[in-house]
C-alpha cells in the first residue's frame, strides 16, 4: 500500500521538527 502524501504549510518553530519526523517515518512530504 502506498503511503499518503503529507503537506505542511508554514513551517515555524514547531512545524520543522514535525516535518522532519514525517520524513523520518518514510512519508513523502510536500
Image (cartoon, rainbow, N blue to C red):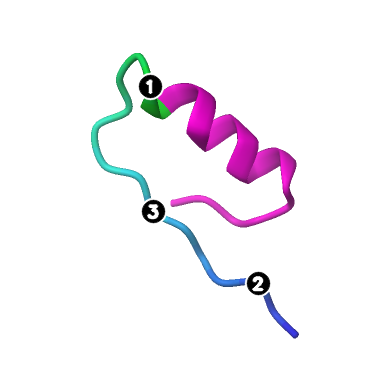
Q: Is residue 3 magenta?
A: no
Classify mark 3: helix, strand or loop: loop
Q: Nearer the viewer, residue 14 or 19?
A: 14
Relative horizontal placement of residue 26, taking residue 20 as reference (left or right): right
Left or right: 1 as drawn, with respect to 15:
right
Magenta residue span: 16-30
- Helix, strand or loop at label 2? It is loop
Few, some or many residues within 10 Å of mark 1 (<14, 14–19, 20+): few
Question: Of marks 1 and 3, which one's residue comes earlier in the chain?
Answer: 3
Q: Going from the N terminus, do you reach mark 2 or mark 1 first? A: 2
Above or below, comparing residue 12 to residue 19 in the picture: above
User: Gap in Å between the C-alphas at discs 2 and 3?
Assistant: 13 Å
Picture disc at residue 3 = 2
Please provide percent x and percent y for residue 5.
51, 65
Residue 15: which quarter of the image? top left
Residue name at image x 35 percent, y 45 percent: 8
Q: Residue at x 75, y 85 (%)?
A: 1
Identify the image quadrant of residue 4. bottom right
- Distance Cα–Cα, label 1 vs label 3: 15 Å
Residue at label 1?
14
Q: Pointer 3: residues within 10 angstroms few (<14), some, or many (20+)?
A: few
SS label for mark 1 = loop
Residue receiving disc 3: 7
Q: Is residue 17 magenta?
A: yes
Magenta stretch: dominant SS?
Answer: helix
Seen at 26% across and 42% down, the residue is: 9
Kindly check if marks 1 and 3 are in contact, taking CB atoms under 8 A apart as contact.
Answer: no
Q: Nearer the viewer, mark 2 or mark 1?
A: 1
Considering depth in this image, is 23 or 13 the residue closer to the camera?
13
Residue appearing at x 43%, y 51% in the figure: 30
Amino acid at each position: 500500500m502506498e503511503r499518503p502524501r503529507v503537506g505542511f504549510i508554514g513551517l515555524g518553530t514547531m512545524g520543522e521538527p514535525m516535518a522532519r519526523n514525517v520524513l523520518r517515518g518514510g512519508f513523502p512530504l510536500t
